[in-house]
Amino acid sequence: MPNVTFQPAGRTVEVAPGVTVLEAARRADVPIRNECGGHGVCGRCVVEIRRGEVERRPARHTPPAGKDLACRCVITGQDVEVFVPAESRQVETEVTIRQVEALPQAFPPAGAVVEKVSLQLAPPSLDDNLADAERLVRKLQKWREEDNYSISLRLLRDLPLELRHAEWNPEVILSVEPWGRRVLRAGPPRGRALCLAAVDVGTTTVKARLLAPGAHRVASCYNSQTMFGPDVISRIVHCQRDEEQGYADLQLRVVGDINRLLGELVRESGLERSDVWGVVVSGNTTMMHLLLGMYPIWIRREPYVGCAYLLPSVSPRDVGLKINPEGRIFCLPSVSSYVGADITAGVLATGLADREKPSALIDLGTNGEIVVGCRDFLVCCSASAGPAFEGGASASGSRALPGAIDSVCGGERVSWETIGGAAPVGICGTGYIDLLAVLLKEGIMDKTGKFAPGAPGVRRLDDDTLEYLFVSAEEAGRDDDIVLTQADVDNLIRAKGAIYAAGNVLLESLGMTWSDLEAIMLAGGFGERLNKDNAVTIGLLPDVPRERIEFVGNTSLAGALMAAQDATGYWRTREIARSMTYFELSTHPGFMDQFVSACFLPHTDPERFPTVTGAG
């Protein structure tokens, strides 16, 4: 079989004829950008074939002269050498660690999903001849009045020796279960801290935090599943293409990411992996399926049903997580195929389900999940916004990394700021929101999102389409211009229209408007860099008093952390998931009308945005 060598990585892989260069790169563990899932549309997987011949298949995107698209090049019968230029390489999945505030709880937290207790057992005698296991359970029932305690066969085999080595004063570690508590260890005191971890498996980024003495850090890395596509749909499609190995590829990737994060956190804290006894995980429904190795393909097939939403705790051995092998992994519950555990975690973290007055929680990610409610009700939906606001599907889009343009201002000359002050390499989500608002205000773009011919920065291409030259190659930290294309604008308008329309559908079903909400909480990575006025100007957010719009940060990780340190929070997420009423927008009779009306800057009804349009 032919060999494919990738430069500058210097990696070689043997593949069968008929495999694309993109797939060969995945097998060689050489990350190549591909936002379209390998359909020849995005044009991000540009490579140079430096040696050997390949079969070139038609593509909707034409690469530069002398270059090819990795997803459209098929290996034939001969060896090939491929050069991957810098702009086509995925951002590596190095771990980033940042300091955070210390948690106020003691360690291990009392009442956590996994906790430790020291017991004093009466040794057996002729007058008290209970079996060792029953003796342990009897004492546990006095410690905490619960009837159901489970001890695994693995633990039972060692229990007699462990209790006697502990001289009947064992250290016992237990985890919570729906039916009671599971005994994970009973033996001599280890003299080690019992640590827990909270993990947010995002589609783009994976984050983790330890609950341990002196552990005041959050670790993050890019989700290495992105080499199979930028969003959940493209990753599900990969599972469909290879029903035997596809989901295993993705499961292996995300578990590897979590293992790297936890490894760095325990090392930074002077701990060991075996000190981690419990991990609480949050993420969207597809990410939870892929983490546990559950087949996800019916999530994208009508009627859009997942394998399971209320997930059991599992052993680290079952998924390959490198913590204490006797520990437990707790996956927070989802509501539906497209309203996941990240949203139930967010509802927990923000206290939305306990508020007296209705508020909204909006996650501005790929799916655009929205929850409206209070302690009396919770309704939710998911708007298929796509990766437009994450930069993935745009011509000059970028993740939120150093050099990404995240702030834009108008005036005599449109100006910008980048993350870290580095030379601009692309535009991230907040930058796109600002840019649309500025171009609209400056008259460079009209209310339909069309560029004004002859306006400053607008240029006509060979195919007679228009685009906006934002940053020239001379100013940029890359080899080509940073631009905003008409296709980019159309995608962004559709994304913002889907989110706004979804919120309208939920509110109208309740007989409410945006003005009736006490707060509109924005979750996700946009953070404080999102300009509220600009988000309202383009119609992404409603025109309400700006103080009602709140940034609540990564509520997925915050909710997982709350659930880890207090088992009542873990059970509360299950109550929240059960209590939510889910609206399937694809079949809702009013959604399409709402969506079409919202695909305008800011909206076809000017009275909805009086501070922008001057109406009302």
Image (cartoon, rainbow, N blue to C red):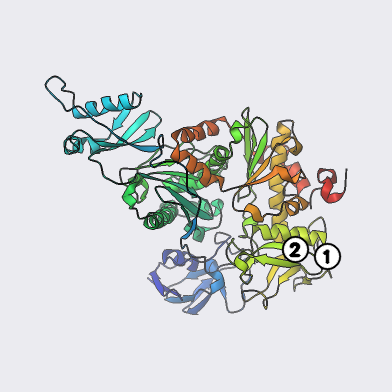
Which mark identifies residue 93? none
Quick one: which residue is furthest to the top in this view?
127
| Three-letter code for the amino acid on which mark 1 is drawn | Ala
Q: Which of the 4 quarters of the picture holds residue 486? A: bottom right
List x then y, in percent, for residue 551. Answer: 64, 47
In this rendering, the label closer to the viewer, 2 or 1: 2
Q: Residue at x 38, y 56 (%)?
A: 263
Q: Amino acid at mark 2?
A: Cys
Q: Quadrant of residue 153?
A: top left
Query: Is 602 displayed left or right of 10 in the figure?
Result: right
Label placed on residue 452: 1
The C terminus lies in quadrant: top right
Note whether residue 284 is visible: no
User: Residue tagged by mark 2?
Assistant: 409
Of residues 399 and 60, which is closer to you in this image? 399
Point 69% across, 39% down: residue = 519
